Image (tube, rainbow, N blue to C red):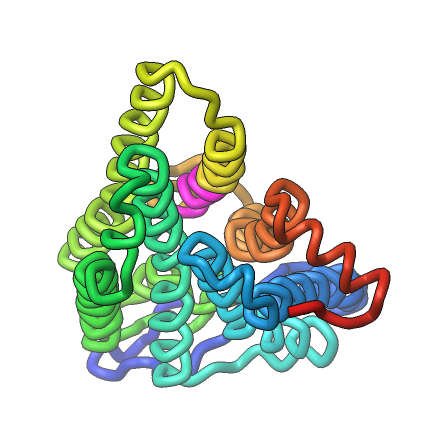
Amino acid sequence: MQNPDRNTTYTDFILVSFSGPQEWRQLLFIPFLLIFLIAVSANLFLMFIILSQRSLHSPMYLLICAMAFVDLSTPIFFVPNLLVSLLYNLRHISLLGCLVQMFFMHFFGGFQSTVLLWMAVDRYYAICTPLHYNDYMAFSAFLKFIIAPVLRNTVFNLAIVSLAGSLSFCQHEIDHCFCEHMALVTLACGTIRMNNIVGLVAAFFVPTADFLFIVASYVRIFFSVFKSGKSSRKALNTCVTHIIVITVSLILALFAFLSYRINYNLSSNSHTVISIMYVLFPSCFNPIIYGVRTKEIRQQIMKTLKCGKVTP
């Protein structure tokens, strides 16, 4: 429904989440609560294992811990609100609250690919230049790989949020369960051409650029391993774990990104489910994948579960 007075703008919005009768929506509370609890507990447990075990304080495991932190943070910014809206039908959110949620959702979401890039850099140095690994992965040397992506992600997210906040809104129903960028700006009264351009540029320079660098790193890694003819089963096994996580994350991200820019004739509920899967699926399964496929972490998890304590 259009706002009859185009000189005014909505500053309060309704997150539609899932359409349908309230009784049906309330049934979704339990599965989403369980998924949220799994995501939070699994990532907290993985972080606890890594941080409490001194033998796991090498760069590779600390980067896995950073991934767990990102996977823990992202759902915290929207799932509690979603659960409240499903249970009590409280779906209102202010423009300021929407912009804050948008910034943190996209900020931590963008860092999923960035942490995977850092992992690829770590594996590249470990496999291709093993004699200089400690020099390259010392914090002071690795800082250059941290500062540039952090500044890049922050600048793009601030630009996206600032442009969205400058719009006038003639509609107030956000067809989503959280304040996703395109779901909000499509409610604007005027043109959103600049928002689209900045959003596409950010998508190219953050997840797409990260993915291209990751692919280049792994091509060099596999070429180096096969050229040397040496057995690097452990290193390749770690690489395969990262590739599984990257592939799943990329597929879900592409579905979520393109579903709002290309007309697939999807229902509003389908859009919502795709975006929720993009956020919650990695948060639930990344710690399981790393916990099962990374030998040292798996061994420490088993010790902890058997003895009820962590052995330093």
Looking at the image, can residue 156 be seen? no
Q: Position of residue 28 (x, y in %)?
A: 75, 61
Say whether residue 292 is left or right of residue 5.
right
Vertical position of residue 253 compared to residue 162: above or below: above
Numbered range of the magenta stretch: 249-257
Q: Position of residue 88 (x, y in %)?
A: 71, 80
Vertical position of residue 172 compared to residue 190: above or below: below
Q: Nearer the viewer, residue 142 or 17?
A: 142
Number of numbered discs on residues? 0
Q: Position of residue 113 (x, y in %)?
A: 37, 50
Q: Nearer the viewer, residue 52 or 213?
A: 52
Say whether residue 58 is left or right of residue 27.
left
Residue 56 occupies quadrant? bottom right
Q: Quadrant of the C terminus?
A: bottom right
Is residue 105 within the magenta segment?
no
Q: Main secondary structure of the magenta part?
A: helix
